[in-house]
Image (cartoon, grey):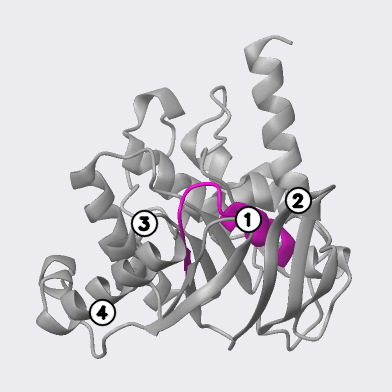
């Protein structure tokens, strides 16, 4: 398969996944996980998990590589059905119903190289039936707020890694779903850009509240961006600890992550992570 054709197919799959019919009025994005377990044949990936996340809460999932974090995220949003147990979003447990509540942002930004930044951002709106001019206008209203003003017509190859991620996040946000599922969105960025994007995302979520489930291998990122963090063990994954982020947190990221209370919780999380790999 040619590379451009492959990318189009992947992006179309992404768009289809996030552009299910919108949930009914009044949905807020509360998540409940009850006795969840999952296996691929004889390979057990998730032992048992019980979690709750209130509407507009931000939950971080951390754990060693290969422990099942991304699988858990896919189970939550309805891309997979669990082998046992139940996941509910606003009381809906069927996979299609959960998916209708969720916008999913994978590690790769999946921007289409032949579309401009604004048309990539507006893809979710176009898939909902908006005409191009209306979709561009709605997406364009957020470009300045997202630090993208002046780059509306730029192609993805002309954007920095951080700007590509902003476009991808904007596309995810304007899908209009109450739950955002973010799978290591900044993993491919260098350390400086990653820190900048963490600060930017924290600000974006304060202005556009959503229920968020974030998968990351970065403890500092999880504690800075999330209200709660669940530390998972090696496969089969189980929760070895649940931590709350220090509060109140400084608005400035560098100040927040160097605060003694923040450092103490981060060290506790690191201890739990080590224990979970034994």
Residue 142 lies in what quarter of the image?
bottom left
The crowding category of the residue bearing disc 3, from other C-alpha atoms within 10 Å (few below 14, some 14 to 19, many at least 20), is some
- The CA span between labels 4 and 1 is 28 Å
Q: Which mark is residue 217?
A: none
In this figure, which residue is indicated by the disc labeled 3?
146
The kind of secondary structure element at disc 1 is strand
Q: Which mark is residue 265?
A: 4
Name the N-terminal-most of marks 4 and 1.
Answer: 1
Does residue 246 sit above or below 172 in this rendering?
below
In this figure, which residue is indicated by the disc labeled 1?
104
In this view, which residue lies farthest toward the front? Answer: 278
Would residue 157 be visible to someone looking at this image?
yes
Does residue 26 sit above or below 173 in this rendering?
below
Would you say 4 lies left or right of 57 here? right
In this figure, which residue is indicated by the disc labeled 2?
17
Name the N-terminal-most of marks 1 and 3.
Answer: 1
Q: Which region shows up in magenta?
A: 60-76
Q: Residue at x 60, y 55 (%)?
A: 235
| Quadrant of the rendering where the N terminus is positioned | top right
- The CA span between labels 2 and 4 is 35 Å
Name the N-terminal-most of marks 4 and 3.
Answer: 3
Q: x, y percentage for residue 218?
A: 34, 57
Would you say 268 lies left or right of 204 here? left
């Amino acid at each position: 398969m040619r590379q451009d054709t492959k990318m189009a197919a992947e992006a179309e799959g992404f768009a289809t996944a996030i552009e299910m019919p919108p949930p009914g009025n009044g949905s807020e994005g509360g998540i409940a996980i009850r006795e969840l377990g999952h296996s691929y044949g004889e390979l057990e990936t998730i032992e048992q998990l019980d979690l709750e996340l209130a509407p507009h809460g931000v939950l971080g999932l951390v754990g060693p590589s290969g422990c099942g974090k991304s699988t858990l995220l896919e189970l939550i949003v309805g891309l997979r059905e669990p082998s046992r147990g139940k996941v509910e979003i606003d009381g809906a447990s069927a996979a299609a119903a959960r998916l209708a509540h969720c916008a999913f942002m994978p590690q790769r930004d999946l921007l289409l190289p032949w579309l401009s930044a604004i048309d990539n951002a507006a893809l979710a709106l176009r898939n909902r039936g908006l005409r191009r001019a209306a979709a561009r206008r709605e997406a364009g209203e957020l470009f300045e707020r997202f630090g993208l003003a002046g780059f509306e017509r730029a192609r993805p190859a002309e954007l920095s890694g951080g700007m590509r991620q902003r476009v991808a996040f904007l596309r995810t946000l304007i899908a209009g779903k109450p739950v955002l599922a973010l799978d290591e969105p900044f993993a491919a960025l260098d350390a400086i850009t990653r820190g900048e994007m963490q600060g930017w995302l924290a600000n974006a979520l304060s202005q556009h509240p959503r229920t968020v489930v974030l998968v990351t291998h970065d403890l500092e990122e999880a504690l800075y961006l999330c209200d709660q963090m669940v530390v998972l063990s090696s496969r089969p994954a189980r929760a070895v600890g649940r931590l709350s982020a220090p509060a109140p947190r400084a608005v400035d990221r560098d100040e927040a992550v160097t605060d003694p209370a923040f450092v103490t919780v981060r060290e506790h999380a690191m201890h739990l992570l080590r224990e979970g790999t034994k």
